[in-house]
Image: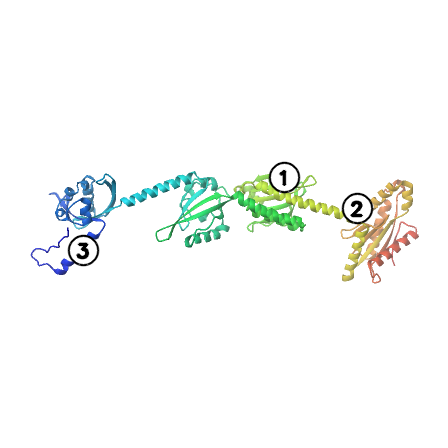
Amino acid sequence: MPRQPSAVAGRPPDAAALQGELRLHQALDALREALWLLDAERDAGGRITDFRVADLNHTAAELAGLDIATARGRRFGDLVPLARRLGHIDRYAAIVASGHRESFEFSVADTDGARVWRRLNAARSGDGVVVIVSDITAEKARERERAAAEDDLRLLAENASDMIARITPQGRVTFISAACEEIMGYAPEEIVGRLDQEFVHPGDLPALAVSRRHLETGPEPGPSTYRVRRKQGGWVWLEASSRGVRDAGGALTEIQVATRDVTERMLSQAEHAALHRVSEAVAENIDPADLHLLVAAEMANLLDADGGRVVRYIDEGTIEVLGAWRRASLPPTRSGELLALSRTWAIAQVRATGRTSVSELTSADAADAGAGLRMGIAAPVRLGGRVWGAVAAAFRDPGDAPVGTPMRVERFAKLVELAVANADARARLTVQATTDALTGLANHGTFHAALAEEFARTSRYGRPLSLAVIDLDLFKTLNDTFGHRAGDAALATVGSLLRDHARQADVVGRIGGEELGWLMPETDAAGALEAADRLRRAIAAAPICGPLGITASIGVARRTQLDQDPDHLFRRADSALYQAKENGRDRVVIAG
């Protein structure tokens, strides 16, 4: 029933005040919450024993099943015995004494026996309290549904092989399933509360940020892949599907992420691409130095290693670096560098065993090595059945090496092995095509090509060039007396002596049956004459054909302005040789 405002006794009612009080009561009656104004009732000792109802709104009256007019002035404990049984009277007394607000929830059975939930907020007002009671039964039901759904989600997440996480829009992890320990090596409690960006590979952070922005502003993005750090070291590739949870206004409140370990798939794809690039380089016969550098870089990039090398064994204690890649923060290794082989390296173990090897250094040994690389994984490169060299990957921490690294290093080593074998075969074919089989010297065509090249060079730069033509004396008599095998042996011995006397820049070849040529760049007539005579004496002193021995006649010509082409220079040297023969053999004659 509507309340009627009352005037203060002995004072005529103020119309404006009455109208304001009426509007206030109407506003209170419009509230969905139950409101009670309670005044403290005290005993003789001043202790609060109950409260009298100073006022209440319609919702409070309906909730308690009371009439507003009859409820006013009554003891609250008598009107609502349940409040006394639940201890509310004592709580209100404590609020009046302390002045503190209090809020609590409780449940009661309604007329049908169903449980209903209330939330009570109470605050001191004068010598009493203001009590507001809300029905939160529907809210509690939603909480139970949400909790049940979360329990189901947690049960599903904890038993799924995929890693499931709940993340705030700012990236802070609020839940992660137990699969994180299998995938990342971290227990859930080591991740919850931290930003997920802390675990993501620095190179993948920009792409992750773009994916998150799309999730905030537009439709949910498709699956994304990125690397996360393992507790034991190294990185794991994850494929993630993300779903945004939004509030009633559409604002993003949570990100739910389901991820699976796709490391093997990503490494296999990357390895296939890397091996394809190296295979193409092998097929194109690119320069070996470029190929070895490509192998070292491709392998290190694939494995996220700190260094990669292709090396060749020089002897038991020395290797030559053919190609190397290292992170910029590490001391560089140069191609062509010779290094002493430490027996603690995996490369040394490969040489000793002929098998793929893994070495793990202590921190002290790694520091002594100068680069701080603690793990090496090396695979052999074979040529002709022997261990020719090795391909190796190095890591600062043993845990950084991905699973399957030894097999992947082996596959790169096989490509290097193929390239080395191809280069060796090409070199053999080149030697066969350009070398005289008996003497090991350049053959006729190769020698004359070198003569033409050097002649052109001296024409451009005006540098000295000399040519010696050597012929074994009485070679036909040697063949007739001792047979062709003796003649071949004599030619082979003289060819060996000629190689020994020639400098590295000289070209020596067999240009006829028993005729040899010696091209001497940067050599004048006097130098050529002296070199040729040393060779003549060496031939005469060599034990060729037993006690009979053998001698040689040599003609020498220095290139002059009269020599307009290489053939003219050759004819002059050949003419000098003829004069040496005519003058008694076993001598050197220089062309005039």
Q: Name the secondary structure under disc 2.
A: loop
Amino acid type at mark 3: Leu
| Residue at mark 1 | 350
* Residue 270 on image: x %, y %: 56, 47
Q: Nearer the viewer, residue 284 or 442?
A: 284
Q: Where is residue 567 shown, x and y percent of the image? A: 84, 57
- Give amino acid for label 2: Gly
Disc 3 marks which residue?
24
Residue placed at 32% from the left, 42% from the top? 144
Splitting the image into 4 quarters, where does residue 346 fall? top right
**The C terminus, quarter of image:** bottom right
Q: Dot 1: within a 10 Å radius of its alpha carbon, few (fewer than 14), some, or many (20 or more) residues?
A: many
The first of marks 1 and 3 along the sequence is 3
Most distant residue in the front direction: 112
Residue found at x 90% / y 53%: 578
Tag shown at residue 440: 2
Please give the label number shown on residue 70.
none
Between residue 141 and residue 579, name the one nearer to us.
141
Determine the secondary structure under disc 1. Answer: helix
Q: Quadrant of residue 486?
A: top right
Q: Circle 3 sits in a helix, a strand or a loop, which is it? A: helix
